[in-house]
């Protein structure tokens, strides 16, 4: 599921707004039934955890230079796939990853664990619109019931479909981009070898869906709100936020400040006439530079929220 090529709406679990599409599928010979919600969630979350904990450490190489992202007090480490020039994922996909480690504190340039939760796990897309200048609108298309627990220990699993539109300057030259994304967030399972009071990390994953495969009623809703000249683009992303295990040394205070690790990996295609080499270029303000800037944008917004 973690790929740039958009998935059809037919891959999603049953939902009342997809009933029309289900009727059409029943008429199609050999059409597979929709997956059960819990099985669908478990499959994606397992794939996401494997990608973050195994694929990235094994196949992504850190860039030689740490990057600043004001007002963040933490530097940002960029990582690119070491496997091939196309990046990690399907053929032709270009994945970029970043990591940053932040003090768990309500101070300018960093944030508390609770602030990371509220900003990156809850209302992820709406918050992104608040701190990202290019995000012009977020529309909820579908929402499934929150699963308090999913097999394997995943908790508070939320899944919905959002339509996110970005606008750029100059508007006369750069068309808006609209992304239809399946958004899933969850607290990860508690490891067996950790203390009961250990705070598990959380994931937020976004998977691209194809506008052309949406049901007729959804297509009408989408077309009624997007800019007329919008280009439907695609991206997939994975975010993982966790507390680092760093027990204090015997000579240090038991109140040693906790540290939070924020990992994000993404692959995207803006579509239109923007060349891939521009989208991948740091100098031209492409994806690598944008994902580094997001750290500072989020922490700056968090500080303003804290002081308001």
Image: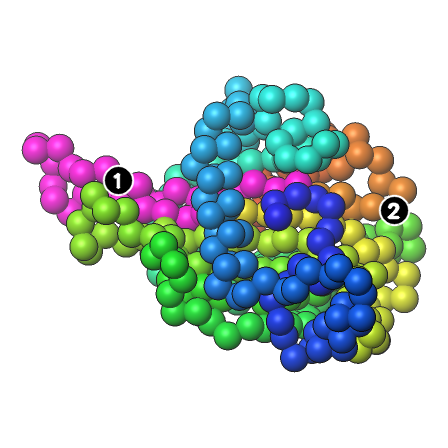
Could one spot residue 223 in this view of the protein? yes
Nearest the viewer among 308 and 238 is: 238
* Residue drawn at point x = 68 percent, y = 35 percent: 90
Q: In this view, does 211 lie to the left or right of 74?
A: right
Choose the circle earlier in sequence order: 2 or 1: 1
Please say whether residue 303 is one of the residues in the magenta stretch.
Answer: no
* Element at label 1: loop
Could one spot residue 177 in this view of the protein? no
Is the residue 284 above or below the residue 162 in the image? Answer: above
Which coloring applies here?
rainbow
Please say whether residue 254 is one of the residues in the magenta stretch.
Answer: yes
Residue 245 is labelled as 1
- Crowd class of label 1 (few under 14; some 14 to 19; many from 20; radius 10 Å): few
What percent of the width, then of the height, locates residue 164? 70, 62
What percent of the width, then of the height, locates residue 290? 64, 42
* Residue drawn at point x = 70 percent, y = 44 percent: 4
What percent of the width, then of the height, locates residue 243? 32, 46
Q: How many marks?
A: 2
Q: In this view, does 121 lie to the left or right of 231?
A: left
Q: In this view, does 56 lie to the left or right of 165?
A: left
Per the image, the residue denoted by label 2 is 272
- Crowd class of label 2 (few under 14; some 14 to 19; many from 20; radius 10 Å): few
* Residue drawn at point x = 54 percent, y = 27 percent: 60
Nearest the viewer among 86 and 106 is: 86
Is the residue 274 above or below the residue 178 in the image? Answer: above
What's drawn in magenta, residue-wise? 240-267
């Amino acid at each position: 599921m973690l790929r740039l090529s958009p998935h059809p709406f037919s891959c999603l679990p049953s939902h009342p707004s997809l009933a029309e599409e289900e009727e059409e599928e029943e008429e199609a010979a050999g059409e597979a039934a929709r997956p059960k919600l819990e099985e669908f969630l478990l499959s994606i979350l397992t794939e996401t955890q494997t990608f973050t904990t195994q694929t990235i450490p094994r196949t992504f190489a850190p860039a030689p230079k740490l990057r600043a992202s004001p007002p963040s007090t933490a530097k940002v480490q960029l990582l690119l796939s070491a496997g091939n020039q196309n990046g990690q994922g399907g053929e032709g996909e270009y994945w970029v990853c970043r990591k940053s480690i932040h003090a768990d504190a309500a101070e300018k340039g960093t944030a508390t664990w609770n602030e990371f939760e509220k900003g990156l796990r809850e209302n992820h897309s709406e918050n992104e619109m608040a701190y990202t200048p290019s995000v012009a609108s977020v529309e909820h298309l579908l929402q499934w019931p929150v699963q308090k627990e999913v097999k394997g220990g995943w908790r508070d699993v939320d899944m919905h479909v959002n339509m996110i539109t970005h606008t750029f300057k100059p508007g006369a030259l750069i068309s808006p981009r609209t992304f239809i994304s399946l958004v899933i967030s969850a607290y990860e399972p508690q490891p067996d070898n950790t203390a009961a009071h250990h705070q598990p990390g959380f994931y937020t994953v976004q998977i691209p869906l194809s506008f052309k495969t949406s049901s007729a009623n959804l297509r009408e809703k989408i077309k009624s709100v997007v800019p007329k000249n919008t280009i439907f683009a695609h991206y997939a992303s994975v975010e993982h936020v966790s507390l680092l295990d760093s027990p204090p040394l015997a000579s240090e205070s038991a109140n040693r400040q906790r540290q939070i690790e924020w990992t994000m990996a993404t692959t995207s295609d803006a579509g239109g006439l923007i060349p891939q080499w521009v989208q991948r270029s740091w100098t031209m303000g492409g994806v690598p530079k944008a994902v580094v800037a997001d750290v500072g944008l989020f922490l700056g917004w968090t500080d303003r929220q804290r002081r308001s």
